[in-house]
Image: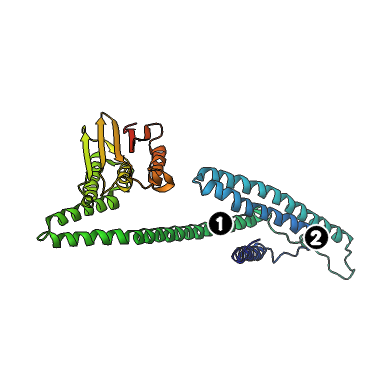
Amino acid sequence: MHSKQEIYKIAKTIALHIIIWVVLFFLNYLFLSNFKIPFDFLYHIKIWSTYIFLFYINFYIMMPNLLFKKKIFLYTIASVLIITGTFAIKSQVEFKKFDNVFAENMTFNKRFKPIKHQHKMSPGVKHRYNRMPLPRMTFMPLYGLLLVFTASTSLRLIKKWQDDEKRKAEIEKVKISTELIFLKQQINPHFLFNALNNIYSLTLSTSTPASGAILKLSSILRYMLYETEHAEVLLKDELNIIEDFIELQKIRLTDKVKVDFQIIGKPSTHKIAPLLLIPIIENAFKHGVDNVNDSFINIAVIIKSDKLQLIVRNKIVNFRPENGSPTGIGIKNIKRRLDLIYPERYSFETIEQDSVFCVDLKLKLNA
């Protein structure tokens, strides 16, 4: 079932084509109005069949597949061939029609006998009575074909222009809509980022620990807003953010929780997918911290050549996170990202033993 809009569009197209053909009909017979040709339905069907064929083969096939695809030379050759072919067919139909009309006229004149009191006519005058005036047939078939071909080309070009303008408007609309959605999504993070900067400026003269914490949080937000839009970031930048993240987490911890973070090796110019390692570390702080009893979190990043290894160990506290295991949904998401970004270039293991949960990630940074 077509919608009302689609039905209206189809009806509008049909009405436009009907108008075009009515105009072509009158223009085509404008130069034939002085010729007294008996109406022949079959003859007109043949003539207008050639017009319709030429119009729509150019409109639906030649222009979309040749002209609009920049195949101008092929389109020119095809146009010449199709016009020549239809011209030959139309000429034969018209020649045959006018020959029949002329033959009928000659038969009528042979039966005509002049009255006795009529003056004797000269041979030239008699000749003019015997022949009915006919159009010059050499260029007449070409006139109608060129008129139809021009109308077909013009209408198709106008339609293409309208379609292109509509497509541009739709693309612009989608672009604006996407930008608005993006801006709406970024309002809160940007507001928080700017607010933190303002608070940081106020705390500089009063509280050094608070100022440092705000600065680290601001740095993390800046990284999440502006750096993570890239497919890869510098490994050293990712490690700096991890260090800031760990320092912020340590603010809420008591002396009962021992946190150790070390980087072995140099990140050099290696790159890594952004925010790939932080969820693993966040999982340890989320599910391995006990501020009442002794607990620990050990984090080691080992870099050798183009290999990176992340080892995170933490004490398993009494409660269980999502799905009843210390891994949680976050770890599963990390494995999914690794499958997509580093297929066959990583190993990921989780081990639970003696109340200790361990994550061991080995990653080849360069393909």
Instruction: Please name the amino acid that badge 1 sits on.
Output: Arg
Q: Position of residue 11 (x, y in %)?
A: 63, 65
Which quadrant of the figure has residue 326?
Answer: top left
Q: Position of residue 169 (x, y in %)?
A: 45, 61
Instruction: Please name the amino acid that badge 2 sits on.
Output: Asn
Which quarter of the rendered picture does the C terminus lie within? top left
Q: Position of residue 282 (x, y in %)?
A: 31, 46
Which quadrant of the figure has residue 237?
Answer: top left
> Quick one: which residue is furthest to the left in this view?
205
> Quick one: which residue is furthest to the front in this view?
293
Residue nearest the observer in this picture, 154 or 364: 364
Which quarter of the rendered picture does the N terminus lie within? bottom right
> Quick one: which residue is furthest to the bottom in this view?
117
Q: Position of residue 194 (x, y in %)?
A: 23, 60
In percent of the image, x 37 and y 59: which residue is there? 179
| Labels 1, 2: front one | 1
Q: Give the left or right position of residue 261, taking residue 100 as reference.
A: left
Residue nearest the observer in this picture, 222 or 362: 362
Residue nearest the observer in this picture, 51 or 228: 228
Which secondary structure, mark 2? helix
Which quadrant of the figure has residue 154?
Answer: bottom right
How many angstroms separate mark 1 from mark 2 (CA)?
47 Å
Q: Give the left or right position of residue 302, taking residue 333 as reference.
A: left
Which secondary structure, mark 1? helix
> Quick one: which residue is furthest to the top in this view?
305
To which residue does mark 2 refer?
130
Scheme of colours in the image = rainbow
For the residue carrying disc 2, how many other residues have a C-alpha within 10 Å: few (<14), some (14-19), or many (20+)? some
In percent of the image, x 29 and y 33: which residue is there? 308
Disc tally is 2
To which residue does mark 1 refer?
156
